[in-house]
Image (cartoon, rainbow, N blue to C red):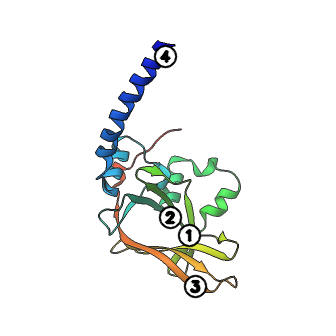
Amino acid sequence: MRIVRVNTMLFAVLLSSLLPLNAQNHAGLTARDYYKELYAAGGLNNMAGGHACFQDDPKASSFFILRESGSLRDSMLADGTLSKLPQAAPELSKKDFVMVRGYAEGIPWRGEELLEKDEGSWISDLRMLDERTPIRIRFNIDWETLRYKYAVEMLNMDLTYRTEAASFGSCEEVPADEQQHIED
């Protein structure tokens, strides 16, 4: 019984001494740092390659990767994966959309967000923030300058615009020879 207490105590002391070190090492990391770290570790999903996007705030720790449907279609045709997709996929592959994969401090969001073309921007499906607030994501990008606006629009119940929370930033192309291709 005494050995277990000593080993548990020793483990607790070692763990508590390592936690501040780990927290201190990651305290000043920016979104670009997390991106570089994730890229170096081989952790970027090839379905979300194309452009890495960073907020204007240099202290931000989140970033996202996006890929336009045209480039996604081209790469899937080239490597033969388009023909292997389920029946519904070819219909989706004919639509204009962007696929967004976000990362908060290097940890991926719950999945990709598919945003469909809506005139000069890209929008998500509607969802409910609470029982009285429908929301949707609206993404605008200037493909020449790669400046973007990523907004969560809060709507009234009649789906008219109420307000939004937005972030602004810029994207940079990930050169094709640097894009990662991870096999499942």
Give the label, 1 or 3, closer to the camera. Answer: 3
The amino acid type, in three-letter code, at marker 2 is: Gly
| 138 sits left or right of 174 in the view | right
Q: Secondary structure at mark 2?
A: helix
Residue drawn 56% across the image and 53% down it: 110
Q: Earlier in the sequence, mark 3 or mark 4?
A: 4
Q: Is residue 177 visible?
A: no
Q: Secondary structure at mark 4?
A: helix
Q: Secondary structure at mark 1?
A: loop
**Residue 10 location, x and y as percent?**
39, 23
Say the numbered circle drawn on residue 4. Answer: 4
The amino acid type, in three-letter code, at marker 3 is: Arg
**Residue 118 location, x and y as percent?**
57, 78
**Residue 153 location, x and y as percent?**
55, 77
- Rounded to the nearest angstrom, the CA distance separating label 3 from label 2 is 33 Å
Crowdedness near tag 2: few (<14), some (14–19) or many (≥20) residues, C-alpha within 10 Å: some
Q: Residues at badges 3 and 2 in contact (C-beta under 8 Å)?
A: no
Q: Residues at badges 4 and 1 in contact (C-beta under 8 Å)?
A: no
User: Which residue is labeled 3 in the image?
Assistant: 162
Say the numbered circle drawn on residue 70. Answer: 2
Give the label, 3 or 2, closer to the camera. Answer: 3
Q: Earlier in the sequence, mark 3 or mark 2?
A: 2
User: Which residue is labeled 1 in the image?
Assistant: 96
Residue 183 vs residue 63, the one in the foreground = 63
Crowdedness near tag 1: few (<14), some (14–19) or many (≥20) residues, C-alpha within 10 Å: some
Q: Secondary structure at mark 3?
A: strand
